[in-house]
Image (spheres, grey):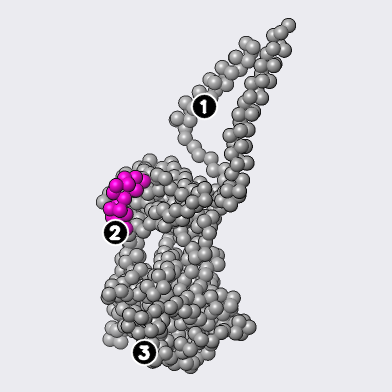
Amino acid sequence: MGKFLVSMLKAFIAILLLNLLAGFIYTRFDLTEDRRYTLSEPAVEVAQKFDGPVIIDILLDGNIPAEFSKLKSETVQLMESFVAKNKNISYNLIDPLEDETKAQETIAQLQSLGLQPANVTVEENGKVSNELVFPWAMVNYNDQTVKVPLLKNKLGSNSEERINNSVQQLEYAFADAFTKLSITEKKSIAVIKGNGELDDIFIADYLTTIRDYYNIGAFTLDSVASNPQKVLDQLNDFDLALIAKPTQPFTDAEKYVMDQFIVQGGKSLWLVDQVAMEMDSIYAGGGSAIALPRELNLKDFFFSYGVRINPVLVNDLYFTQIVLATGEGNDSQYNPLPWYYNPMVFSRNDHPINTNMEAVRYQFTSPIEVLENDYTKTVLLRSSPLSKTDGIPREISLDILNQQPDQSTYTSGNQPLAVLIEGDFSSMYKNRIKPLDLNGASENGPANKMIVISDGDVIKNQLRNGRPLELGYDKWTSSFYGNKEFLVNCTNYLLDNTGLINIRNKRVSIPLLDVKKITDQRTKWQLINIGLPVVLTLAFGLFFSYYRKQKFSG
């Protein structure tokens, strides 16, 4: 008995010393298969930039549904990882609806800040109820605050997929917020004008979103005709050129200026319609309009980079809807109807730009043909397997809504709709006669990248009462698409030199309990979890009592 007590005393002292040592030496061990508690190097770098207090308010405390409890615990684990890398970072768990007497007032205040709640249906003991949850965090540094969405919805996701999607994007979401708060020198984006591009009001939401990261300036090519050297010199002050749905041809001189901007290291994001067709034209034409090729004088330009936007239309059985009114006056009804020329494009999650992203809405798009050359091409988005191409000129009529599509004709699917091009770019005018003389013109350039998207409407936000709505929101069907996230990812990838965008490739898998099995086997698991420990305790007590009697009876 004495030896037993000595052993117990030694074990107690060892544990005590180990805990005292742990107070001076802190380390963490990530034993998860997917390494989800190990921060990526870019996330660590951006977190360590802060030399003052960073306070993170997480609005996920209180009585929340089970799936959000899992999201809360994963968020807290991530916060602990950030705190371990920078002691200036701290976090608070907040229940925004703790005071029930002020619940409606609090909800209104949060919504006015742009924090939209999630309406969750909860089923417990056969009873169904709806609860509001605010899955958001607020990152505060100095006098700045950045909102971080914790919930990641994707079309058709179930509860488990929604939590997995949300957890997968947590590290990037917070690292992105830290980046916004720590930027001291912003890169610059030139919004190209002069060739009939979209007015600012139609790209307002995109520009507002990226303003947190970059300086933005309108830049016209009109002066190329009179002073091309000055235009190029001024354009070279920008890091990226955005060309959003041009409708007028580029002159050879304008192409050469853009060519030199790119060859000399400038990034570019092109959103180009090769076919002239709009829903407004169909409505104005009494229900039909003629789709025609749009001549932008850019075919040889894109060809030199290894892509060709073919002047045909993609017809896709994975579609987004349009809304048509039937009836007159107060009896009017608005009905959502399938529109095969507006593809709903789902990502294959095979690149940091398109990983864990909602479907993107295209409108009257054309396929991009990927050509062989020395540059690396990555197809970021494709049409569905059930799609085809329709040649033009072609009459597009609302009458197709009354016709059942012949699925057997949809055999040319998976058409590229967005392509990333990377490489050491050469001038399209290399070994050719130049349209004009430019000082310091280059024929070969450094490593560079550009993205070509075959639909200008991908960046176009709708208006309500003359004010821009959120990009990706369709006011007619109240549907949200992933257009804004996709374009912001494209921009960040083109301009991001820290590797932050690569965090989006991180994969995690969160196993959740089977709700149906829990309900069906509730009694069984209650007995196991409550009854079994009691039985084992009694059995041990009886055995120990019997053992003592046997040992000391003699």
**Viewer-side label of 1, 2:** 2
Q: Position of residue 128 (x, y in %)?
A: 47, 53
Q: Which residue is located at x 53 percent, y 82 percent?
A: 315
Query: Which residue extends farthest top?
Result: 554
Q: Secondary structure at mark 3?
A: helix
Q: Amino acid at mark 2?
A: Ser
- For the stretch drawn in magenta, what is the main secondary structure? helix
Check if mark 1's residue and mark 2's residue have beta carbons within 8 Å: no
Say whether disc 3 or disc 2 marks the residue closer to the N-terminus.
Answer: 2
User: Is residue 139 placed above or below 342 in the rendered structure?
Assistant: above
Magenta residues span: 95-113
Q: Secondary structure at mark 2?
A: helix
Q: Which residue position is annotated with label 3?
A: 284
Q: Which residue position is annotated with label 1?
A: 18
Q: Which residue position is annotated with label 2?
A: 112
Q: Position of residue 120 (x, y in %)?
A: 44, 55
